[in-house]
Structures are given as C-alpha cells and as structure tokens.
Image: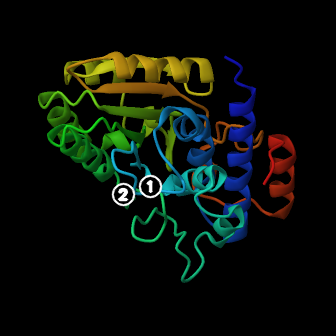
Amino acid sequence: MDYTQFEKTAANIRTGIVKAIHNAGSGHPGGSLSAADIVTALYFKEMNIDPQNPKMKDRDKFILSKGHAGPVQYAALAEKGYFPKEDILQLRKLGSKFQGHPDMKKVPGIEMSTGSLGQGFSAAGGMAMAAKLDKSPARVYVLLGDGEIQEGLIWEAAMSAAHNKLDNLTAILDWNGLQIDGKNEDVMTVAPVDEKFRAFGWNVIKIDGHDFEQIFDAFAQARACKGKPTMIIAKTIKGKGVSFMEGEYGWHGKAPNEEQTKQAIEELGGEW
C-alpha cells in the first residue's frame, strides 16, 4: 500500500492543530501532534463513518479519552468534511462549539464529551457492550494518553472489557512518554504497560505510532482477534512534526507564538 496520501493528510491535520491552538492562545499541542497519525488512520481508512450522516446506524465510534487533545480530533473531523476547516479557528473562543475538550452535544462527529481523564475509556467499553447487545457490527476505538493510565478508573474499565469479552473494542495508547509535569517514569511510572494489559486479559500489540504500515496492520490484527479486547501500544513522539516541540514536555499545554507558528507550519508542510 502507498501511504503517501495518509502522510499528507496527517500533515494537514497537524497544521490545523497548530493554527487553531495559536489562534486560541492556549491549548495542548504536544499530545495532539503525537496522536495525528493514529487519528488519520482511523478517520481516513479504518472506521466505517459518513461525514454526511454523522449519526449513521451501525457506524464505528471513536472516543478521545485524552480529551485535552481535542484539536487533533477537530482537525481530523474538519479534514474529513464534517464541517469547514476554518471553523476550528474558533477553538476555545467564548461561545464557540469548539471548546478545549470535545462536546458531543455541539460538534458533529464527537461521540463522547471527554476531558476528565479515564472516563472516556469507560464510556467506550459501555458503547462496545451496547453494540454487542444490539448485535451491531459497529466497532469502538478509544485513544488514551500514557499519563492518563495512571488513573484508577482505567483499570476498572480494563477488567470490565476483558470480562465481557469485548472484541469489538480497540484501545490505542498514545505512548509519548511525557505528561504535563515531565516524564511518566518520574511522575508515576506506568511501565510495563504491555504486561499489565495482558494480565488484565487483553490482546496486546506494540507498534511505532508514526508508521502507517504498522498502524494499519495492528488494526487488522485487532479485528481478527476474537474473545478479548485489543490494546495497541503506540510509541510516539510528543510534538511530532515540529522540531522545537518534539520530546519537550513544556509543549504539553502551551500555544506557539507568531514566529513559532510560522516555523511549525513550514516544517509540517501541510495545507489548511
């Protein structure tokens, strides 16, 4: 498969992220940029969705459990055609539907209002259970942050999903190694993540979260796995695509200034 178009789409999404956060004067660029390739793969190949019919029956669902990375989902939805791209430049503006965390009641394509860490994972499990009960072919995808899995609620949801054999649930861990206060290993180590999820009864796959071949192969493996949910541990780089943001936890929640934004857009090479 030629992954060039996916790489271009991811560059466009990253460009949208940077522009929106700069225009807002606040936001979370680091973890939004690290997740862009995963989100691109979901919205532009993996999921059965329709921008013209956001509430389509038996559609697949994506939950952004790390809701502070809302800009990556807004940019992806705009790129997909759910609403005009320029709309997300209203990010975090008073009265805007594009707030710092996704709002399912205001933004088409948002399946769950998230932001309180851990809750999106539980909601995704509930949606997967509902699909099973309805005998629906719909699959549920949920993106977690590595700092987020320090929350106790995560492990309750992990137990529940495995107990109920939710093989229609795929979780992706955006494992960039950094959170607001520094390295995961310094704040509260989450390793070994793979061993923990296997012990909780999950099918576990480890990949490079910026390699589209590995991303798509992991999704195929998740679909083929029966009787248990799948956790894809995606090793990523915080701030991916912007040289001065990459691997810097200080860019977890800070907007770039005018000069930095110009440099970032040039480096990304996207169209927005």
Judging by the rendered image, the residue that carries numbered circle 2 is 112
Amino acid on which disc 1 is placed: Gly
Residue sitting nearer the eye, 174 or 244: 174
The residue lying at 31 percent from left, 49 percent from top is 118
Q: Is residue 119 left or right of residue 189?
A: left
The answer to whether residue 95 shows anywhere in this view is yes
Q: Position of residue 204 (x, y in %)?
A: 34, 19
Q: Is residue 72 left or right of residue 57?
A: right
Could you tell me how far apart the alpha carbons at marks 2 and 1 are, in whole angstroms? 9 Å
Q: Is residue 151 left or right of residue 15?
A: left
Amino acid on which disc 2 is placed: Met
Can you say whether 219 is above or below 97 in the image?
above
The quarter in which the C terminus is drawn is bottom right
Can you say whether 124 is above or below 84 in the image?
above
Helix, strand or loop at label 1? It is helix
Q: Position of residue 51 (x, y in %)?
A: 54, 54
Residue sitting nearer the eye, 160 or 41: 41
The quarter in which the N terminus is drawn is top right
Figure coloring: rainbow
- Residue 34 badge: none
Residue sitting nearer the eye, 52 or 79: 52
Q: Is residue 200 left or right of residue 236?
A: left
* Outermost residue, left side: 163
Q: Position of residue 194 (x, y in %)?
A: 34, 20
User: Mark 2 or 1 closer to N-term?
Assistant: 1
Could you tell me how many numbered marks the image carries? Answer: 2
Helix, strand or loop at label 2? It is loop
Judging by the rendered image, the residue that carries numbered circle 1 is 67
Q: Position of residue 197 (x, y in %)?
A: 27, 24
The residue lying at 40 percent from left, 52 percent from top is 56
